[in-house]
Amino acid sequence: MQRIPEPELMDDDAQARAYANADFSEAHQFYVRLFDDTFPRKRTKATVLDLGCGAGDVTVRFAKANPEYAFHAVDGSAAMLRYAKEAAKANRGLPGRIRFIEGFIPGAPIPDGSYDVILSNNFLHHLHQPQVLWQTVKQYSRTGTLVFVTDLFRPQTRAEAAAIVGKYAAGEPEILRRDFLNSLLAAFTPSEVEDQLKEARLNHLCVKIISDRHLMVFGEMV
């Protein structure tokens, strides 16, 4: 099935509110556990760049699980960041460790030159030019930076995509079901992601399927 790109930016308040209010706790907490399992010897103290943080739930969960981590979380949507800041404020001690930054990559006002950890969750499929993400990873990493990118991957057919939406989002609001389907259609296949990494000369990073709809890209920068 051919990829069908979707809008890069979720800047509608109703859309942002739907994501902020949705219960993604199971999936998002899984990413936190998966990070720990993937990097069992991770640093206890680290600076983290979170690219495409959206409504901030994943960022908050990583911050709660890693109390010595400081986060710069970037997103191009002012609407999403309003909810992300609210989510951080609802958790005592987190606002001082998470700085939310509005901006597009490349070009966002990212404060540090490099980071110990670079995260990205469900952001890659929004990009019309995927090299934007991988070149940003290269720009803000250094030897030893841990890279942990999770995203959807595209099913073989639209019918398969619709079945996944029915399985996992049947009870969600229409706006979330619509976006979920569009995101599956816009996602890259694992082989396409591997080709992206080769083009970016990041072949040392690994691509792994982690569910019937998700993949991860992970590794340590050399």
Image (cartoon, rainbow, N blue to C red):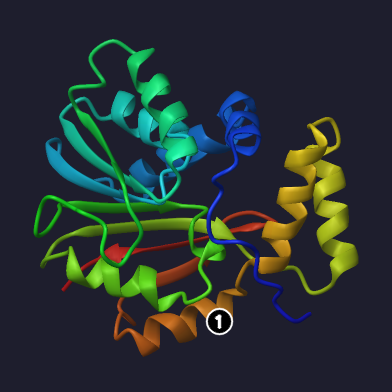
Q: Residue at x 77, y 55 (%)?
A: 181
Using the image as rendered, state which of residue 137 and residue 45 is in the foreground: 137
Compared to 85, does 44 lie above or below? below
Mark 1 surroundings: few (<14), some (14-19) or many (≥20) residues within 10 A: few
Q: Which residue is mark 1?
A: 192
- 41 vs 209, left or right, is left
Residue 74 location, x and y as percent? 32, 47
- 120 vs 154, left or right, is left
Quadrant in the picture for the C terminus:
bottom left
Using the image as rendered, state which of residue 209 and residue 121 is in the foreground: 121
Residue 204 location, x and y as percent? 30, 78
Q: Residue at x 11, y 58 (%)?
A: 114
Quadrant in the picture for the N terminus:
bottom right
Amino acid type of disc 1? Glu
Which residue is the extreme one toward the bottom?
199
Whether residue 42 is visible to the viewer of this picture, yes or no, is: no
- 206 vs 150, left or right, is left
Q: Residue at x 47, y 42 (%)?
A: 54
- Figure quadrant of residue 106: bottom left
Q: Residue at x 84, y 30 (%)?
A: 171
Using the image as rendered, state which of residue 173 and residue 158 is in the foreground: 173
